[in-house]
Image: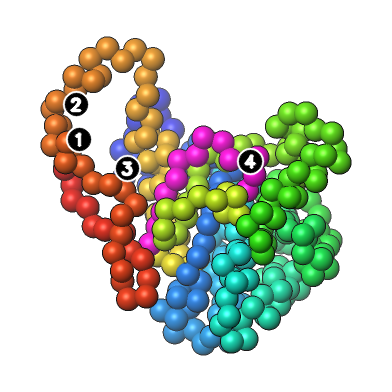
Amino acid sequence: MSPQIPTLEQFLGAPLPEIQAVAPATIVWIVEGTRRSAALAGVAPDDYARWSALQMNTCVGMFFEHGVRHVFTQFLSPSQFAEVTPNYRERLFDYVGLVAQDPEILAPYVEHGWRVRLLGADSLPELRPHADALLAATPRGRHTLWCSVVAEPEAPWNELLRAVTASGALDREAAIRALYGEDIPLATLMIAFGKPVVSPDRAPPLITGKMDAYWTQRPGYRIDEREFRTILYDHLHVRRTWREDKTGRDEAAKETRRAWEEGPTLGLGVRLGPFWYPSPTREP
């Protein structure tokens, strides 16, 4: 990009190599509301899992094409394993199997040399065949989709402690290698859905650096290139307000007094039918 800060429109229209040069190496991507997304798209309940996986591939491909090398995403969460929805919990491992075995879902990873790695098999033996199948189908590449399956909230910590104990790791870098099998740059960007919540099953242990977090209210795998570039622009330019010399910085707040004295509380919400939705805010 230009040494000067570009406008948003310039960033949205910039050539792909310029975006690739400044994109974070690692992001955390928390997707929820996949059944809601399928319902809104008119997809039958029995078809939603496969449809969602194909939607996921479209988004992952866009991330990789824009320069991201590692995408950590929560594939199944403790709340899903706790459901009593008829014929749902029993099929969760079948949903994971789709990614490991369906030729159409695997195709873009094999074609482009993208890896898919399944996290959680140490705690859930049922996942091991799927994890091994993904390792065999996508053995190498510069881009990796890390899919976590977490049935119990404490499982990520238990796996971390076992890996560190077995390896004798004494620093963060060594612990990352012990847990994930390789060096991974720390994540500096998180894109999530719904309620502003952070937990170990959402943001995996060790790889979360100083992350800028963004929450969309579009359920499922719906993020597109324009939305991603808009988030990148904010992450790279709008939030970069720190400076070494803060002389006069505090006084500048007087020019926008009402914004600071009457500002909203981010995270408050309202009920939208059976769902939570963020309270609307107004521009200061």
Looking at the image, tell me whether mark 4 or mark 1 is earlier in sequence order: 4
Q: Which mark is residue 260?
A: 1
* Callout 2: SS: helix
- In space, the residues marked 3 and 2 are separated at their CA atoms by 24 Å
- Give the residue number, with chain letter if any, for mark 4: 207
First of labels 4, 2 by sequence position? 4
Q: Which residues are magenta?
A: 204-217
Residue at the spot 40% in from the left edge and 65% down from the top edge:
218
Q: Is residue 25 visible?
A: no
Indicate the position of residue 219 as horizontal and vertical percent values: 44, 67
**Is 170 rendered above or below residue 138?**
above
To which residue does mark 3 refer? 8
- Callout 3: SS: helix
Q: Secondary structure at mark 4?
A: loop
Left or right of 123, for residue 231: left
Check disc 1: other Cα within 10 Å, few if <14, some if 14-19, many if 20+.
few
Task: Compute the Cα span from label 4 to label 2.
Answer: 35 Å
For the residues labelled 1 and 2, say whether their Cβ atoms are less than 8 Å apart: yes
Q: Name which of mark 3 and mark 2 comes first in the sequence.
A: 3
281 left or right, relative to 64: left
Would you name the residue on which mark 2 appears? 253
The residue type indicated by label 3 comes to: Leu
